[in-house]
Amino acid sequence: MEKLLKAGVTIKGTKEGLLFFLDDTRPFDEVMVELSDKLTNQSHAHMWDGPLMNVIIKLGKRRITAVEENEIRTIFTSHENLVIHAFESEDMPYLLELTPSLQVRSGTVRSGQVLTHQGDLLFMGDINPGGAIHSTGSIYVMGALRGLAHAGSNGDASSIIAASLLRPTQLRIADTISRPPDQWNDKDIGMRFAFLEKKQIMVERMSYLSRIRPEKDWKENGHLHR
């Protein structure tokens, strides 16, 4: 039997106005499409063209960025009588405070060279043995990491280091230094990332990232979808 898809947007009327419940298990973009459809649905015209009504947006366990908040507000601008009074997330602030935007750089860091960066960095290229890359945020290398990488250099222990080929001479996250390079498994294939857990640097497949670092989801930085 085909499983019915839960509604992305549910509307409930109260004495104070309308509550819009946005499903926190559905992708944000899908929920926005459904929200727009509901507000243009002629069968609900009597609700949208009436007197002024306060609207509270219920986000569930979802938190949104300022850009996503503006997207929701823009959808409501087609109905001047619907006034967004508040956004609410369960037991936490609804607005997600972002880290500095992810910056992209490319090239090759050769032996003796040191690349430093403020914030999260996506590096398109290789870090050769003897080369080093330091960032106050997370480091994502679309290439081979065979040199030294230091993420969270200002003390951010939640930073990660990811690479298409992870064969570093040394990894550092905040103040913690990785295991010796001869302990890396040459049989590991595919993009992997290193993270800090109980003051020890651990390495996992990229698919594991959302389990332990949900805040590192790149959509929150406006780059990839969660």
Image (cartoon, rainbow, N blue to C red):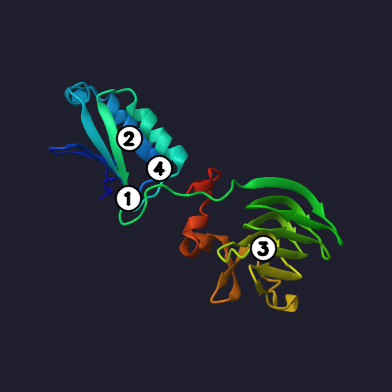
Q: Earlier in the sequence, mark 4 or mark 3?
A: 4
Q: Which residue is mark 3?
A: 153
Indicate the position of residue 163 as horizontal and vertical percent values.
Answer: 67, 59
At numbered mark 3, what does the secondary structure look like: helix, strand or loop? loop
Residue 136 image-quadrant placement? bottom right
The CA distance from mark 1 to mark 3 is 32 Å
Disc number for residue 89: 1
Q: Which residue is mark 4?
A: 28
Of badges 4 and 3, the one in the foreground is: 3
Indicate the position of residue 85 as horizontal and vertical percent values.
Answer: 28, 37
The CA distance from mark 3 to mark 2 is 43 Å
Indicate the position of residue 143 as horizontal and vertical percent values.
Answer: 72, 55
Indicate the position of residue 146 as horizontal and vertical percent values.
Answer: 77, 64
Q: Earlier in the sequence, mark 1 or mark 2?
A: 2
Q: Residue at x 70, y 61 (%)?
A: 165
Q: In the rendered structure, which amino acid carries the disc numbered 3? A: Ser
Q: In the rendered structure, which amino acid carries the disc numbered 2? A: Glu
